[in-house]
Image: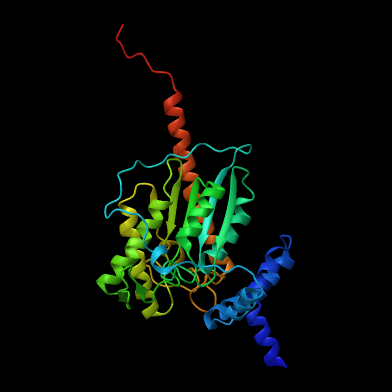
Amino acid sequence: MLGALLLAALVNADAMVERAERKPLGEGRDRSLALWHPVQDVAHITQLHRLRQLGDWLVGAEGSGGDLVESVTPDVDVEPEVRPRPVLRVPSAAAPLRVYIGGDSVVRDAGESFQRIAAQDPRLSTTLHYEIATGLSRPDFYDWPTALTSDAEAYRPEVAVIMFGGNDAQGIVAPDGTVHSTVDSPGWRAEYGRRVAAVMDRLYAEDRVILWVGQPPMRSGGFNARIQVINEVVQEAAAKRPWVTFVDTAPVLGGPDGRYLDRLPGGSDDLRQGDGIHLSRAGADLLAQHLLTLIDDEIADAARAATTTTEPATDTTPP
């Protein structure tokens, strides 16, 4: 009986998380999510959630995902088109800045913290979209490039906070069918870099700033080495695109030398969950506050630019 109950919980974990997320903000919602998020993670790791998806499909519900080759073959040049750095408008309570946060389960907690803290600032309006156990390596499982394009059209974000990588250190298939099995191979780096660049280019807009958040240091040395490859690929693509800022999370969530930390020196709260990967609430709050500071800096730059363009010219002709 206990085994049957456990299996049912894993099969229906997605539905239970969705139900919990519809609850009003408060302690009850937080407790439900704290209970069901780990169950959902296990369900996705074991793929047991697909039994529910299969059942939904058999009764006529629509599935998700995308064609592998079509999804990873966007129209993108080897070298990006030269475009200027976007300047945000100065937001107000009447016209708040539209912020979009998208990514996998690592960004889930940071995104929830961001929404909670940003709710105190009427100049910001935030949308969060996360998908458990997803990334850019497996568009056949979840097609993020298409989803991001759709979200950009629907929400018209002026700041897009993007975070992928926690699930991407795996084999990857190039459009010609070549399989690159390890992240340290040149072929894997090139293909993943192409996908990252394509997403950055798809999200470009003249009034949109993209903050691409790097992965934090990981407890496992082997996994951390693979994550650093992903960060390097993303940072290289961002460096070629003025509209994208790579956000290094190592100084925020790691030690002075960028190594993994369970907690900050002198701190009492764990920064990470027990798996050494996902963020605890304290770690998520820390990252969210850092992102809000970066956005505040962008808004300040916009205000200075607006002041410069509206100030009357000064007559410098000598008397």
Q: What residue is drawn where x is 61% and y is 54%?
A: 117
171 or 226, which lies in front? 171
Q: Position of residue 298 (x, y in %)?
A: 46, 43
Q: Is residue 292 visible?
A: no
Name the residue at 46% across, 41% down: 207
Q: How many marks?
A: 0
Q: Horizontally, is 170 left or right of 144 in the view?
A: left
Residue at 56 percent of width and 49 percent of height? 154
Q: Residue furthest top?
A: 319
Front residue of this view, candidates 22 and 153: 153
Residue sitting nearer the eye, 185 or 126: 185
In the rendered image, which quarter contains the C terminus?
top left
Q: Residue furthest left?
A: 186
Task: Where is residue 114? Give x, y as percent.
Answer: 57, 56
What x and y, as percent, mark residue 222?
36, 80
Q: Position of residue 247 (x, y in %)?
A: 41, 57
Q: What is the quadrant of the N terminus in the image? A: bottom right
